[in-house]
Amino acid sequence: MGAPGAGKGTQAVGIATHYGVPAISTGDMFRDNVKNGTPLGKQVDAIMKAGDFVPDELTEQIVADRLDQPDAQGGFLLDGFPRTMHQVDALDDYLDKHGHSLDAVISLDVDPEDLIARLLKRAELEGRADDNEETIRHRMEVYTSSTAPLLDAYKSRGLLVAVDGNGTVDEVGARIAAAVDAKVGR
Ligand code: AMP
C-alpha cells in the first residue's frame, strides 16, 4: 500500500521475485483490458482516466479470478488491492474460504512533495492516461480518504510493515525485503 507514486508497482515486482510469488496488480490488469479493448476495459477506461475507483464488486471479482490461478496457490503479492474497506472484507472472505491468510501488509511511505514530482516524471516516461496534474491530485485525495484508513485496520491486526519509501529503487527494495523477512520470520 502507498500513495500514488510511492513506488508500489516497481517494488511489487522486486518483492514478488524475492519470495518467488506472482505480483498481482489490479491497475495492470485493468490497463491490459483497456489496451485490448475488452468489455471490462471499455467499462473501466473512463473511470481510470478520471482517477476514480473501479467499482468494488468488479475489482474483487478480477482479483478472486486471478488468485484462483495455479501460479498463485503457493503465495502471491497484491499490488494496489485492497483499496477500500469493502475490498478488505472481500479479500478476508476469499482467503478464509480457501484456508489462506495474509502474512504482511507493506506500506510504502514517501514524502508528499516527492510524490507529485515522481508522477509527473512517470507521465513523461510511460505516458499513462491518469498521470496528468489534475488527475494526480484527485487520486491523492481518493487515496487519503478511502485507502489510508485501511492502514489503521491492518495495523491493529498486527500485519502492517511500514517502510520508508524515500531513496533509490534498490535501497527501498532492500529495506522492504529486510522488514518483511523479519516479519514473516524468514
Ligand atoms: P494503480 O496502477 O494501482 O495506480 O491503479 C490505476 C487505477 O486503476 C486506479 O486509479 C483505479 O482507477 C484503478 N484501480 C486499481 N486498483 C484498484 C482497486 N483496488 N480498486 C478500485 N480501482 C482500482
Image: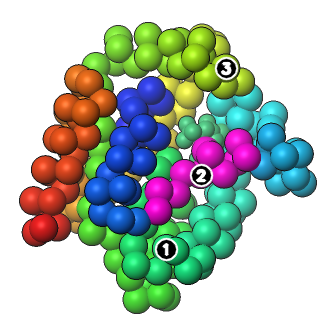
- Residue 21 point in image, percent of width and height: 40, 65
Disc number placed over residue 127 in the picture, else none: 3
Specify few, some or many for label 3: CA neighbours under 10 Å numbering under 14, 14-19, or 20 or more: few
Spatial CA span between label 1 and label 2? 14 Å
Q: Which residues are magenta?
A: 22-32
Q: Earlier in the sequence, mark 2 or mark 3?
A: 2
Q: Specify whether 18 is left or right of 145.
A: left
Is residue 77 depicted above or below 67 in this figure? Answer: above
- Residue 102 point in image, percent of width and height: 33, 70
Spatial CA span between label 3 and label 1? 30 Å
Q: Is residue 24 magenta?
A: yes
Badge 3 residue CB within 8 Å of ligand 1: no
- Element carrying mark 1: helix
- Residue 186 point in image, percent of width and height: 13, 67
Spatial CA span between label 2 and label 3? 18 Å
Which mark is nearer the camera, 1 or 2? Answer: 1
- Element carrying mark 3: loop
- Residue 39 point in image, percent of width and height: 90, 54
For the stretch drawn in magenta, the main secondary structure is helix
Residue 28: in sight, yes or no? yes
Specify few, some or many for label 1: CA neighbours under 10 Å numbering under 14, 14-19, or 20 or more: some
Q: At label 3, which amino acid type do we have?
A: Gly
Disc number placed over residue 63 in the picture, else none: none
Q: What residue would you read off at disc 1?
A: 72
Q: Earlier in the sequence, mark 1 or mark 2?
A: 2
Kindly indicate the quadrant of the structure image that contains residue 114.
top left
Is residue 143 depicted above or below 117 in this figure? Answer: below
Q: Which part of the image, by quadrant, shows the N terminus?
A: top left
- Element carrying mark 2: helix
Residue 88: in sight, yes or no? no
Residue at 52%, 57% in the rendered image: 24
Badge 2 residue CB within 8 Å of ligand 1: yes
